[in-house]
Image (cartoon, grey):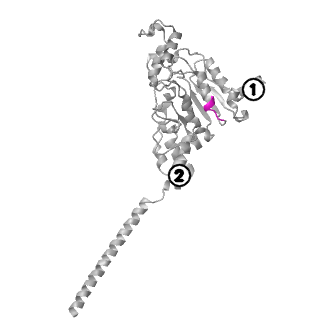
Amino acid sequence: MDQEINELLQELGANKALVQQLEASNRRLERTIRELQEKTHRPFIFLDLPLELREMVYELCVAPGKVFLRPRPQNDVRLDEYKKYHQVEWQLLAVTRQVRKESAKVLFTKNQIVFNNRHDGQSDQKHTPILDWHISSPVSLAALCRKSLTSVSIALDLYNNQFKLEDTMALSAVVRMDAGCYTSSRWQGMDQATRVCRSHGYFHGAGLNWEEYLGCVFLNPDLVNASNTLRFLQVDLTNCYCVLGSCRVIEEAAQYLTVHGLSPPLEVIEILGTKTQAERDIVLKELVNPENYKEHKVTDRKPKVVFKSFRIPEQTHTNLMRFLHTTEVEADLEDCEIDLQELVRSDQVDTR
C-alpha cells in the first residue's frame, strides 16, 4: 500500500512540475504575443503631428505644382514643362484613410492637373472617372477630386478613333502643303480646297470626341461641376483641327467648351494655341454668348480670359509637324488679358 501511495505522489509531483513548465511557457507566449501586437497595432505617430507639419510633408510628396496625367503624347506644348516638376508620390494616398483625405486635398488644391484627350477607348468613358483613364493610383480619387480640384488644363485637339494622333497630324500637314510637294498621285494636280474636300470624304464619320471628353471632365457627378471648386481653366487649342487635320475648328471647340466646361467659380480661363486674332475673336464671341449664361447670373461670373501667344511644342521634331504648326500663324500676336464679365455686360447693353 505504501509503495502504491509513493508512486501516486511521484506522479502527482511530476504533473505539477509539468503544469509549472506549461504555465511558464504560456507566460512567455503571452508576453511574445503582446509585444508583437504592440508592434503591429502601435499608434500611427505621424498623425500625432500638428496638421501644419503634416501638410508640409504632403506638399513635399504630392504638390510639385503641376501633375501631368498619362499618357503623355508628343506635339503637346503643355508637356514642355514636364521635366520641371517631380512625380507625385501616389502611394502616400494609400497609407490610411485620414492621410488619403488630407494629402488628396493638398494634391488637388496645390497643383494644376493636366489632362489630355488620349484614352485607349477600352473602358466605358461615359461612366468612368477620367482620372482612372490616366493614372494607376492605389486608391480611387474621384470623390476627393470633387471636393478640392481648383486648377485644370485640357486640350481640345485633333483626335479620331481610327488613327494615332501623330499619324493623323502628319496626314494633316500633308493635306495642307502645296500640291507639288506630294509624292502620291492621289493628291497631285488638286488645289487645296479639292484636297480638303476629298480628305474629309475619306474620314467622314470618324467624328470628334470632345463632347464625351468634356462631359467626363466637367459633367461627371464625381468630378468638377458637382463641387464648384474650379478656379483656373487652361485650354490648349494648338492642335485644334478637324478629324483629318486639314481645317482649324476653333468655333466648334469654343462651343463645346461653353456648353460643357464653364461654371460660376471660374476666375481665369487661359487659352493656349490660337494662331490668329480671328480665332481669338471666335472664342470670345462664344464666351460672351448670352445663350451660354442662361443658368448663371452674370454677377456670379468674374473670369478673365488670358490668351497666350502661339508656341511650337518642343517635342515637334519633324518638318511635317513644324509646317503644320507654323502655317497661318500671325507672328505679332502677343499675350493679352480680357475681362470676360465686362464683355458680357457690354454685349448685353448692345443688344438692348
Residue 268: horizontal and vertical position, in percent? 63, 32
Residue 131: horizontal and vertical position, in percent? 51, 38
**Bounds of the magenta segment:** 258-263
Q: Is residue 330 above or below residue 144?
A: above
Residue 140: horizontal and vertical position, in percent? 50, 44
- Badge 1 marks a residue whose secondary structure is helix
**With 351 as the anchor, is 224 left or right in this view?**
left
Assess whether mark 1 and mark 2 are in contact (beta carbons under 8 angstroms).
no
Residue 197: horizontal and vertical position, in percent? 52, 13
- Amino acid type, label 2: Gln
Question: What residue is drawn where x is 57% and y is 34%?
Answer: 215
Where does label 1 land, which residue?
A: 348
| Disc assigned to residue 98 | 2
Q: How far apart are the alpha carbons under marks 2 and 1?
A: 48 Å
Q: Is residue 50 above or below residue 126?
A: below
Q: Is residue 307 visible?
A: no
- Badge 2 marks a residue whose secondary structure is helix
